[in-house]
Image: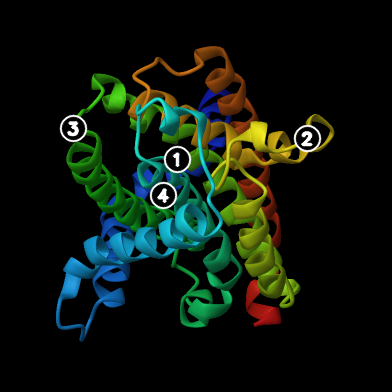
Amino acid sequence: MNLPAAAVSGRSASGPFNALVAHRSLTLELAKRDVLGRYRGASFGLLWSLISPFLMLMVYSFAFGFVMKSRWPQTDSGHAHYSIILFIGLIVHGFFAECLNRSPHLITGNANFVKRVIFPLEILPWPMVMSALFHTFMNFLVFLVLHLVLDHTMAWTTVLLPVVMLPLVLLTLGVSWLLAALGVYLRDISQITGVLATAMLFLSTAMFPITALPPQYRWLLFMNPLSFIIDQAREVALWGHYPDWIGLGIYTLCALVVLYLGYSVFRLTRRGFADVI
């Protein structure tokens, strides 16, 4: 039976999200398994999702705040503690870096799924991103507690953090589909993503304000897709300002382009996965 053109068009337009809606139970189960599997056998279990970001923050704060004497203009006026400003950048980068590093192995690491004709391979990025979002949420809980303890304040605009993070989630999904497909045919790509993730940390506003660089080099930070989201997250969570709605709108449109591009590449190349693996 032929589907109406409008139905086919609508299904094509919502393709990346159809993968989630049509298999939501399976997706949620895979995401749950991913989260719990990471801490299986650990004495503290899921508590490590709270302990790890706190320990990470201590290391970076000591290295950059105490040893290298990094500063933000807002710390001098007492608006926020340096560690809290740094933590926002680490949380945003951590979400993207986790997905970036894991994406090339999504298909090659699940070869048994590839052999099953009925398994919807296109859903694999969704559980990974959901798992990363879970850890991002736990990190933000640690951030909220530390912000209250160190700065004795909390901006109501913090509730807008999910709105700020949404465009990055869309971008990450697109990159994940793209890298998952490329990782099947170009196995060396997993060696590049690790270096790229580190470069995106130190070439963003996560570690230092953009004013710390000479004007002729600031374009490097502007080109990093994490810098804008990090800055907007600080605006709403630390400074109590509304986000740049126009900037978020443009970012979202660009993220949607990457989302559909990555999904399309995945769909076009998936026929050859079983032959290569």
Q: Element type at marker 1?
A: helix
Question: Which circle marks residue 6 in the picture?
Answer: none
Q: Could you tell me how far apart the alpha carbons at marks 2 and 3 are, in whole angstroms? A: 34 Å
Q: Nearer the viewer, residue 54 or 131?
A: 54
Asked whether the beta carbons under mark 2 and mark 1 sit within 8 Å of each other, the answer is no
Indicate which disc, 3 or 4, sits on the residue closer to the N terminus: 4
Left or right of 132: which side holds 40?
left
Question: Which circle marks residue 91 in the picture?
Answer: 4
Q: Nearer the viewer, mark 2 or mark 4?
A: 2
Left or right of 16: which side holds 255?
right
Identity of the amino acid at label 3? His
Q: Nearer the viewer, mark 3 or mark 4?
A: 3
Identity of the amino acid at label 2? Pro
Q: Nearer the viewer, mark 2 or mark 1?
A: 2
Image vertical order of residue 1 relative to residue 268, above or below: above
Image vertical order of residue 166 relative to residue 204, above or below: above
Residue 271 visible to an observer of this rendering: no
Which residue has dot 3 on it? Answer: 152
| Residue at x 40%, y 25% (from the top left corner) | 77
